[in-house]
Image: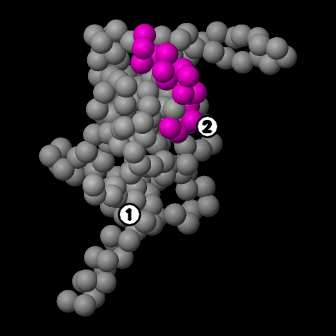
Amino acid sequence: MNALPSHLELVRGVVLPKPVGAHPVLDFVNTRSEWTSRASARTEWLTSYEAFLIWNAYVGLQPSALTDRLIEQADPVEAARSLRTTLDFRSDLYDVLTGAAGNAFEPVARLVEKASGRRRLVRSDNEISWELPEDVVLPLHHLAVLAGELLTGVSREYVRTCPSCGWLFLDPRGRRRWCSMATCGNRAKARAHAARVR
């Protein structure tokens, strides 16, 4: 069996990209490859609702027990609809985060507002926190709330785009150029070296 490229990992039977964005919303956007190239060259890692749930647990957005419950409870039609909405949101969010918004801002804002409106303030033991209902859209709505916080917070000004693949990452120190030196950075170095040799 061939080893996976260094930027990918096998998680519960699903191949997923390793987190490189330094923020879960940016890692969500990075679940598709090659934002900057033709559709035929792209790889989609969120190929099913189950893969999306597994990704959420992998990046620490939800516990594995919740992932298992949602997989068991998901109606196939609702799960497919939720996945389509998730992928549309991801595409619109990428456009908003990169400044290529066009018509993308309104659908992003609508979903963020809808998700925020579904939160309940709950108390458990001595803690008070926001909680979303446990249903098929929980993982998407959790990401939408986080996206709203990113878009309105100070971190927004540190979002950068990898010049090689288009993936997004936070760069608060202004020193980072690539999504990952192990992948895009090394490829760029190899191309530059080859050009010098020629």
- Residue on which the image places disc 1: 183
Label 2 neighbour load within 10 Å: few <14, some 14-19, many 20+: few
- Residue on which the image places disc 2: 153
Residue 146 makes an appearance in the image: no
Instruction: Please check the rendered image and state whether residue 68 is part of the magenta-colored stretch, yes or no.
Output: yes
Left or right: where 168 falls relative to 61: left
- Of pointers 1 and 2, the one earlier in the residue sequence: 2
Give the amino acid at mark 1: Thr
Badge nearest the viewer, 1 or 2: 1
In front: 112, or 127? 127
Residue 172 makes an appearance in the image: yes
Q: Which mark is residue 54?
A: none
Query: Which quadrant is the N terminus positioned in?
Result: bottom left
Give the amino acid at mark 2: Gly
In front: 8, or 130? 8
Measured as percent of width and height from the top left, residue 97 is found at 43, 41
At x 33% / y 70%, what residue is drawn?
A: 187
At x 31% / y 77%, what residue is drawn?
A: 190
Q: How many marks are shown on the rendered structure?
A: 2
Is 32 drawn above or below residue 67 in the view shown?
A: below
Query: Which quadrant is the C terminus positioned in?
Result: bottom left
Span shown in magenta = 58-73
Left or right: where 17 falls relative to 61: left
Measured as percent of width and height from the top left, residue 52 is found at 39, 29
